[in-house]
Amino acid sequence: RKEPIMTFALLYRPRYWWYEILDVLRRLSLTCFLLIFDDPADMIIFALGVSIIMVVVQRECQPYLDPWLASISNLAHWQIVFCVMVILLLQSKMVAARNFVGIGVMLVLVNLVLLAAIFLDTKKSLDRVKKFKQLIEDRQREAEFAAAEAAKAGAGLRS
């Protein structure tokens, strides 16, 4: 019988068992902990800091075992950064209200481009790993064949 906690533990590389806890803290930071601040500017700076730090942590640690899950998580982290940056633009009054639709369209396009780029990169990486594993298997077979031939040649010399 599979333990319920194993569902969470099997998503991550063993040395990153703590990543789920960090991810929950990130979610709480970007939702509940923002309420600590009274000033919207402080909220945005805090959210931007947390989201950028988490992009770096997630990308550098690469805690997920599944490369597709890692890619989708990376995309989600970048989407959060972009959303916070748009909120920063809107709160700074640098963008007029008539440009809100343009900004929304830009966010959708950026998300689609990121999705395509991450998908293609992950697919290429998996293909490279597959080719590398095949190369290793081929080299091992060649080495075993060469060892068997050397053993036959050695047995022929002894007789």
Image (cartoon, rainbow, N blue to C red):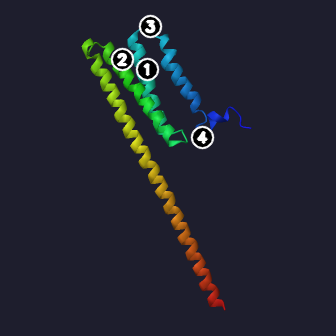
Residue 55 image position (x, y, % from top left): 44, 32
Q: CA distance from mark 4 to mark 1?
A: 27 Å
Tag 4, which secondary structure?
A: helix
Q: Nearer the viewer, residue 39 or 105?
A: 105
Rendered image: mark on residue 47:
1
Of pointers 2 and 1, the one earlier in the residue sequence: 1
Q: CA distance from mark 1 to mark 3?
A: 14 Å
Of pointers 4 and 2, the one earlier in the residue sequence: 4
Amino acid type of the residue tagged 4 in the rendering: Arg
Give the labeled residue for mark 3. Answer: 38
Give the labeled residue for mark 4. Answer: 15
Q: CA distance from mark 3 to mark 4?
A: 38 Å
Of pointers 3 and 4, the one earlier in the residue sequence: 4
Q: Are discs 2 and 1 less than 8 Å apart at CB?
A: yes
In which quarter of the view is residue 90 placed? top left
* Outermost residue to the right: 1
Please identify, in this view, whether the residue under mark 2 or under mark 1 is nearer the observer.
Answer: 2
Q: Is residue 52 left or right of residue 100?
A: right
Residue drawn at (43%, 46%), measured in percent from left and top?
123
Residue 64 image position (x, y, % from top left): 54, 39
* Outermost residue to the top: 38
Q: Are discs 4 and 2 less than 8 Å apart at CB?
A: no
Residue drawn at (47%, 49%), measured in percent from left and top?
126
Q: Nearer the viewer, residue 92 or 119?
A: 119
Give the labeled residue for mark 2. Answer: 87
Q: Is residue 109 visible?
A: yes
Q: CA distance from mark 4 to mark 2?
A: 35 Å
Q: Is residue 34 left or right of residue 149?
A: left
